[in-house]
Amino acid sequence: MSEARARRRGRGGGGAARRAERGAVSFETAKYIERNIPNFEVLNEEALETIEYNAETVLEEIGVNFVDNPAALERWKAAGADVRGERVHIPRGLARELIKTAPSQFTQHARNPARSVEIGGRNLVLAPVYGPPFVRDARGGRRYATMDDFNKFVKLAYMSKWLHHSGGTVCEPTDIPVNKRHLDMLMAHMTLSDKPFMGSVTEPSRAQDSVDMCGLLFGEDFVQNNTVMTSLTNINSPMTFDDVMMGSLEVYAANNQACIISPFIVGGAMAPVSVAGTLTQVLAEVLAGVAYSQIVRPGAPAIFGAFVSSIDMNSGAPTFGTPEASLVTYGAGQLARRLNLPFRSSGSFCGSKLPDAQAAYETANSLNMGLLSGVNFMLHACGWLEGGLVADFEKFVMDADQLGTLHAMARGVSVDSDAQAMDAIREVGPGGHYLGCAHTQAHFKSAFWKSDLFDYKPFETWEEEGARDTYQLATNRVDQLLATYEQPALDPAIHEALTAYVAQKKEAMPDAFM
Amino acid sequence: MSEARARRRGRGGGGAARRAERGAVSFETAKYIERNIPNFEVLNEEALETIEYNAETVLEEIGVNFVDNPAALERWKAAGADVRGERVHIPRGLARELIKTAPSQFTQHARNPARSVEIGGRNLVLAPVYGPPFVRDARGGRRYATMDDFNKFVKLAYMSKWLHHSGGTVCEPTDIPVNKRHLDMLMAHMTLSDKPFMGSVTEPSRAQDSVDMCGLLFGEDFVQNNTVMTSLTNINSPMTFDDVMMGSLEVYAANNQACIISPFIVGGAMAPVSVAGTLTQVLAEVLAGVAYSQIVRPGAPAIFGAFVSSIDMNSGAPTFGTPEASLVTYGAGQLARRLNLPFRSSGSFCGSKLPDAQAAYETANSLNMGLLSGVNFMLHACGWLEGGLVADFEKFVMDADQLGTLHAMARGVSVDSDAQAMDAIREVGPGGHYLGCAHTQAHFKSAFWKSDLFDYKPFETWEEEGARDTYQLATNRVDQLLATYEQPALDPAIHEALTAYVAQKKEAMPDAFM
């Protein structure tokens, strides 16, 4: 419910009723998006075939590096690749053949079955920002992120109507030792939310902790037979698969958990400056990575990832919400669909240092492109600021509100006889108005998407109320959400087992901050 | 040129060189957009045929009102319509037959031939906001618009690289009598800019003044044989064509000038709450309006217009940048293309009272939708604020900057051998980087779109420079542009003739403020 509506209703009711209504916010979560609109496709058949041909040339002729990972090289040899040192040359067609075992769609289970999501097909699952070492809000400014911040973001994601997923490293809790923070982060996702979440990828052992903790949460058998985590496996573009990321991938794939195989591209730095060249490299890298996941365990869920930004060639800064990144993303979506793989891309990307107009233009450009490019899993869907260095509290709720527009857009256009509204047009006639007609009365509550954050009031009312901009409204919303958060129920025995696991793991090793 | 670049270059050069460079801003105008990307289409063939069938039913069975306009009723009778009172029932198929004489594309000439635009086909022409009675800027706040404001907006549009068109009533100069302000507005477009512009529609006599002044500017013969103005003919939805708008349309069409026939829809008030119902009514209204223009003069340019917003059913406020309006616009684009008519829709729409994040999200949603829906003429492409009540100076330059992204998106994806960049991928190889490679060096200047307004600097630099948000950067940009404006040359004899025409017209009638 919007603040405005809560206030309005609150006027007539008592304080308890108001509190109860506000509490209800946490239970209104939309189902993941099922698109009823086409995808936007920028590449024609000839362009697609050219890029696909070139990607195979890259794999065969140039090859990819699997670094510090002799076991991977052995696996590649056994699969038929030409391995020279750490360079893996993959014969034309081999990777494409290997990835055929990867599912085109899979269920990621949440501990609350109503929150499980389908990743792939025409679906779109939205997850919050991932990875920022800093947080920002209007009162506290920009600062290193802590576990307290992390917990707050998990709560905000849990309460957001339009987020389907709790994400992973919503910010880096820098006050917790590097070798232990994954335990606290997992604990937060598992206990403060009941939405699906992501596992740790910063060490293979931490991936294993993620699997083990999921065993406690879901039951070990359930985990072996179902997918309960996605994990973000970045590729060191160009064409380098490091041992940490691949080690984590090996753990997840072996345990039937989903890996997002994601080239990390700042255009002009990690890939060519041209859209077609970038797409070629992205496709080659994803083919190699997904093929490797299928060598480790045929049938393990894998997602075609593409993190793409452009660059300001004057300063070297990555830029976001730009047309070239959009073109790459539209094209990558087409390539992913031709491989029958789920597609991960887009997000609330922006380069701005504040959640201001620049941030919103750039973010809206990215979110719209994400919907229309056929993204199936959108990480960073809210809260991203300053090129991903900052998780911003106000922007988190601003973006989360805008995600509602994607849900409504994706519904597409009904032309059933009710939607044709011919009776309404007849009833109203030339010169009339539709506000009171039967068709409008029947549909007015659901006809139009409405922001729960923005100010729609007339100028005079808005001015009397303090002429607040979106930033100020968002500060209020963050406060209101956190004040009314209620933890979802969890079997105390499970909670206890998880707590014991974390305590035991933390005790077993000294703190490390590097 | 961006402020930043101007400053940077300025350091090394003298004041004169700097001034000359800044002066050069005014000449960097992009050509209108020629799309090399597909349109996004939300309606399938069955949905399109249903809506088209229903629109003909509306025209035949319900009919449209031509109010206080006996001559129009006579014309409709002669054309084969069934006229009862002021209600015109148009037999199925008649309007569709009549509009066949309207051109699918036409040239709107500017007095500077390099600035002439092609309206229709795969082109997109961008024009500024139209109609607000108020203006706003950071220093002066919100206030009634004056002729001084109007002149400033014409200058800003002239200097904007991404605007192809000077527009029409960029704001209402409320300090000039209602019956005379069209003369001053036309004078401003004709003398302060050399981009194409729009004529007055507030009275048929003012439309005639617009034609007559264009006769002085372009030569009377030229005007009779070419299109030198577009004009905005709003329909009083639902299905009402008032005498003032139609009187102006009659003047423009008779003189071979272009009319934008534009239903004005706040969904749920002037049209049904459903997308399909709204599209049905929009199509019926446009068919009737364009058909009427072709009755007046077969072959006169006419544009399929659609101004669409949704509504907040709680407050009754129109809402902008919303998914339902986008779906209507995507569908309207399809309907326009099936009629072979140029399409006008979209703009920098927002409901926000400030050029803040709300404004930018809503605007970016609308601009992206405008590009992908196949809009040919985008009025309101920059400067729109507060539901169109306000023309905002800062937002004008923010939006104008974002229009650059549409140009780059529209270029689409090249897959020529240079764009394939296989040599670059070979040269760099796994683990390398592309910043220094030959391909990047050859293309880095033009590879990525870059804002001339946003801050791309690292956090620390940005903070040292005052931690300015987009709003503050935009204030600086407005100041810088207006300070460096230089008027384009115009034949003094023409200037004199226009001045004399305006003076004579103003003397001939008393001031009227209603």
Image (cartoon, coloured by chain):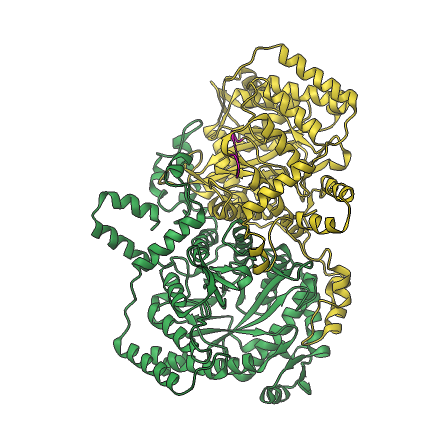
Chain colours: A green, B yellow
Q: Position of residue B406 (x, y in %)?
A: 63, 48
Task: Name the image quarter holding residue A226.
Answer: bottom left
Q: Examine the rendered structure and indicate whether residue B132 appears above or below residue B412.
A: above
User: Foreground: B248 or B102?
Assistant: B248
How many marks overall?
0
User: x, y (%) of residue A84?
Assistant: 70, 87
Is any atom of residue B316 visible in this view?
Answer: no
**B134 within the magenta span:** yes
Q: Is residue B400 left or right of residue A392?
A: right
Visible residue check, residue B511: yes
Residue appearing at x 31%, y 58% in the figure: A483
**Residue depicted at x 67% and y 40%:** B160
Q: Residue B198: x and y, percent?
A: 64, 29
Along the line of sight, the residue nearer the viewer: A490 or B499: B499
As for residue B431 lying within the magenta part, the answer is no
B72 shown above or below A247: above
Location of residue B169 in the rendering, given as x and y in whole percent from the top left corner: 59, 29
Q: Is residue B425 left or right of residue A25?
A: right
The magenta segment: B132-140
Does B314 appear above or below B257?
below
